[in-house]
C-alpha cells in the first residue's frame, strides 16, 4: 500500500479501531466529562482541494468514525457543497482562521473579519471550534488575535492549540507529509511537550511505521491526529505531484525554522 493514499488512510483508521480507540471530533473531545478510555481526536485542516476532504469524510463515515474539518475562507478551501456534504455525514465543521495574516496584523480589523467569516460558516454548521491556519511564510501568528479578543464571547468553546491538554493528549500531524514533520514545521507543533514525546520514542516517519506502532500498542491512549486531506489520494499523478512539491517545501521550511 502506498503511503498517503486513501487505502492506507482507511487502514490507519481500521488499525486504531481494532485497538479500541474511539475516533471523535474536537468539540466532542472538549465535551467529554471524563477523559478516560482510548480516543483519537481526529482533526483535518482543509488547506486546499476540498474534494479530497469529502473522500476522507466518506471513509470515516463508513467506519463510524467522526472528525472535525476546518475550512479556510479562500476558494482553495471554501467550497460550500463540500462543507454541506461533510456536515451531512455527521462530522464537525470548524473555522480554519488566518485573519491576522489576511488583515496584515491589524488586530481590530482581524477581529471584525473573524466575526464575519464565523457567521459565514455558521450558515452551514453551528460552528463551536476554530483552529489556526499556520502558514509558515506568514509573519503573523494567528493566535495573537487572542491577546486582545476572546473567541468565547462568540460561543466558541475551543481552539486545538489553546484548549487541548497536551500533558494528556499526544499530538501527531502529517505536516511535511510525514509523521515527524514537526522538525520542519514553523507553527504546527507543540513545543512544550515535543521533547518529552521524542524521549519516549514516540516518533514515526511513515504511515507503515505508525501502523506497526499501533499494532505493538506503542501509541498512547489519548491522541490528536491532524491531517491535511489534500495530501491523501489514490490518484497516481496527483500523488506524485504532492510528493515532489512537499519535498521542495520541506527544504524551504527547514531554512525558515533555522532562521527563526
Ligand atoms: Zn492550515
Image (cartoon, helix red, strand yellow):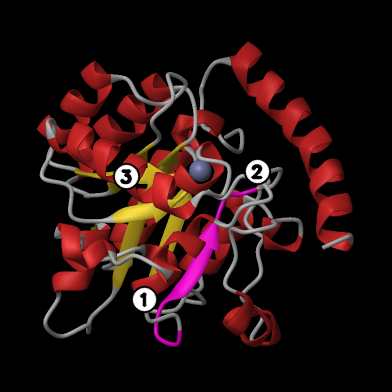
Which residue is rendered at x = 39% and y = 56% of the image?
Answer: 15
Between the residue at mark 2 and the residue at mark 1, the CA separation in whole angstroms equals: 22 Å
x then y, percent, for residue 223: 40, 70
Which residue is under mark 2?
177
x then y, percent, for residue 128: 18, 55
Label 3: how many Cα within 10 Å (few below 14, some 14–19, many 20+): few
The reply, left or right, for residue 95 in relation to residue 259 is: left
Which residue is rendered at x = 40% and y = 68% of the image?
Answer: 148
Quarter of the image for the C terminus: give it. Answer: bottom right
Among numbered discs 1 and 3, the one appearing first in the sequence: 3
Label 2: how many Cα within 10 Å (few below 14, some 14–19, many 20+): many
| Residues at discs 2 and 1 in contact (Cβ within 8 Å) | no
Which residue is under mark 1?
222
* Foreground tag (1 vs 3): 3
Q: Quadrant of residue 163?
A: bottom left
Among numbered discs 2 and 3, the one appearing first in the sequence: 3
Q: Which residues are magenta?
A: 167-175
Disc sitting over residue 124 in the figure? none
Residue at the extreme top: 237
Amino acid at each position: 500500500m502506498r503511503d498517503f493514499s486513501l487505502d492506507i488512510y482507511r487502514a490507519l483508521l481500521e488499525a486504531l479501531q481494532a485497538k479500541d480507540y474511539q475516533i471523535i471530533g474536537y468539540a466532542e473531545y472538549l465535551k467529554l466529562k471524563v477523559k478516560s478510555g482510548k480516543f483519537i481526536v481526529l482533526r483535518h485542516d482543509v488547506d486546499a482541494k476540498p474534494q479530497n476532504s469529502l473522500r476522507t469524510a466518506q471513509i470515516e463515515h463508513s467506519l463510524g468514525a467522526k472528525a472535525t474539518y476546518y475550512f479556510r475562507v479562500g476558494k482553495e478551501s471554501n467550497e460550500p457543497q463540500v462543507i454541506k456534504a461533510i456536515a451531512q455525514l455527521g462530522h464537525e465543521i470548524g473555522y480554519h482562521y488566518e485573519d491576522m495574516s489576511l488583515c496584515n496584523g491589524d488586530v481590530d480589523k482581524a477581529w471584525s473579519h473573524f466575526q464575519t467569516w464565523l457567521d459565514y460558516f455558521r450558515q452551514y454548521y453551528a460552528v463551536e471550534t476554530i483552529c489556526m491556519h499556520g502558514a509558515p511564510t506568514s509573519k503573523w501568528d494567528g493566535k495573537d488575535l487572542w491577546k486582545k479578543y476572546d473567541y468565547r464571547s462568540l460561543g466558541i468553546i475551543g481552539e486545538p492549540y489553546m484548549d487541548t491538554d497536551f500533558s494528556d493528549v499526544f499530538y501527531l500531524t502529517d505536516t511535511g507529509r510525514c509523521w515527524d514533520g514537526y522538525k520542519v514545521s514553523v507553527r504546527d507543533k507543540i513545543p512544550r511537550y515535543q521533547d518529552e514525546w521524542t524521549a519516549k520514542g514516540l516518533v514515526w516517519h511513515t504511515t507503515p511505521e505508525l501502523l506497526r506502532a499501533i499494532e505493538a500498542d506503542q501509541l498512547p491512549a489519548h491522541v490528536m491526529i491532524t491531517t491535511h486531506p489534500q495530501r491523501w489520494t489514490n490518484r497516481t499523478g496527483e500523488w506524485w505531484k504532492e510528493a515532489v512539491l512537499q519535498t521542495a517545501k520541506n527544504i524551504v521550511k527547514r531554512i525558515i525554522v533555522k532562521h527563526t
